[in-house]
Image: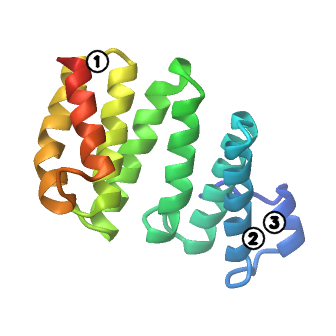
Amino acid sequence: MEHGLDERSALHGYLGATYKTYDIRIFKSQYRLAKTCEELLKFAEAEELYKDSLKGLCHVLETDEHAELIPCIDGLATTLHQMGEKRYQECLGVYQRLLQLQNKFVGELEPSTLTVINRIALVYKDMNLLKEAEAICMASLENCTKVMGKDDPVTQQCVEIVAFIR
């Protein structure tokens, strides 16, 4: 199937081909379980649960572009970043997808979107791609200051990244 739930999947077998409304709660519960695994530093388990939840949500929502996907994609990106340098490239891809959804459904100048931009800069910094990290932070710093003020933690994080790089 298009979004990863085929006839062999346990969820397909349990729910059948006609599930739609009640099952979104299953995938949201799976997301919450992934978040718990992440908080317990069980990153491999969290990653698997986030990915399964995303597949299920995409299937139920019949799209891979929906505001309901944002928390799950955010959790997956954070988990991949915490898993270390071998996962940074994948993490960047997930953060880019998250940023696209944030811009589309939340808005470019919303604090949560600016936070995602800072996280992308942090991944670049952790990859030792300092010019890229600085460029992202410098572009984001003005918006962070304008939207949230100079004393906001997100703005301060952006300032700290730039200070580290310089």
Disc 2 to disc 3, how far (Cα)?
12 Å
- Position above or below: 35 against 23: above
- Position above or below: 156 against 87: below
The amino acid sitting under disc 2 is Ile
Residue 96, horizontal then vertical, whole percent:
35, 44
Q: Are marks 1 and 3 in contact (CB under 8 Å)?
A: no
Residue indicated by mark 1: 129
Residue indicated by mark 3: 12
Identified at 15% across, 52% down, the residue is 145
Residue 18, horizontal then vertical, whole percent:
75, 81
Disc 2 to disc 1, how far (Cα)?
39 Å
**Mark with earlier residue (2, 3):** 3
Judge the density around disc 3: few (<14), some (14-19), many (≥20) Cα neighbours within 10 Å. Answer: some
| Viewer-nearest residue: 50 or 4 | 50
Identified at 56% across, 45% down, the residue is 76
For the residue labelled by badge 1, is the local secondary structure a helix, a strand or a loop?
loop
- Residue 1 in view here: no
Q: Quadrant of the C terminus?
A: top left
**Mark with earlier residue (2, 1):** 2
Query: Which mark is in front, 1 or 3?
Result: 1
Residue indicated by mark 2: 26
Q: Quadrant of residue 7?
A: bottom right
Is 124 on the left-hand or right-hand side of 65? left
